[in-house]
Amino acid sequence: MTTTKYNSSDYLKTAKDVAAYIEAVLEEDDPKLLLAALRDVTESQGGMTMMAEKTGLGRESLYKSLSENGNPKLSTLFEVIKALGLHLSVKAA
């Protein structure tokens, strides 16, 4: 039996795909999972270099912020989300 490695970024081709993925991740209430999802989406959209160009943030800073052990500022998250063409909203639980 042959297996292939699953890579979420292979399936995040449209803005609708990205929005649905991030929305599903946010429902888990897990900050580490959100960082992983933002890394996946960033990879699917051209990588950290592209994200650095779109956000005006340093590539190294983005790698650190979105890493598994990252603890990004809220402003960094907003910049990344905006650069991905997304908008955050809040709804009652």
Image (cartoon, rainbow, N blue to C red):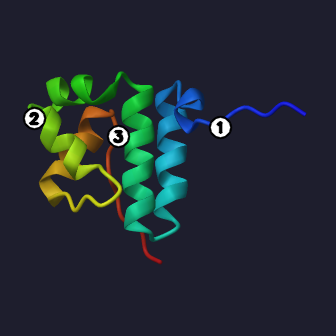
Tell me if mark 1 has few (under 14), some (14-19) or many (20+) residues whose alpha carbon lies within 10 angstroms of its own.
few
Whole-percent x, y for residue 78 in the image: 21, 49
The amino acid type found where label 2 is placed reads Gly
The amino acid type found where label 3 is placed reads Leu
Residue at the spot 28% in from the left edge and 49% down from the top edge: 66
Return the residue at label 3: 86
Whole-percent x, y for residue 53 in the image: 15, 23
Between 6 and 19, the residue placed more toward the observer is 6
Circle 2 sits in a helix, a strand or a loop, which is it?
loop
3D distance between C-alphas at marks 3 and 1: 24 Å
Q: Residue furthest front?
A: 1
Residue at the spot 51% in from the left edge and 65% down from the top edge: 27
Cβ atoms under marks 2 and 3 closer than 8 Å: no
Tell me if mark 3 has few (under 14), some (14-19) or many (20+) residues whose alpha carbon lies within 10 angstroms of its own.
some
3D distance between C-alphas at marks 2 and 3: 20 Å
Return the residue at label 2: 58
Q: Is residue 39 left or right of residue 64?
A: right
Against 85, residue 23 (above or below) is below
Circle 1 sits in a helix, a strand or a loop, which is it?
loop
Return the residue at label 1: 6
Q: Which mark is residue 89?
A: none
Residue at the spot 44% in from the left edge and 69% down from the top edge: 30
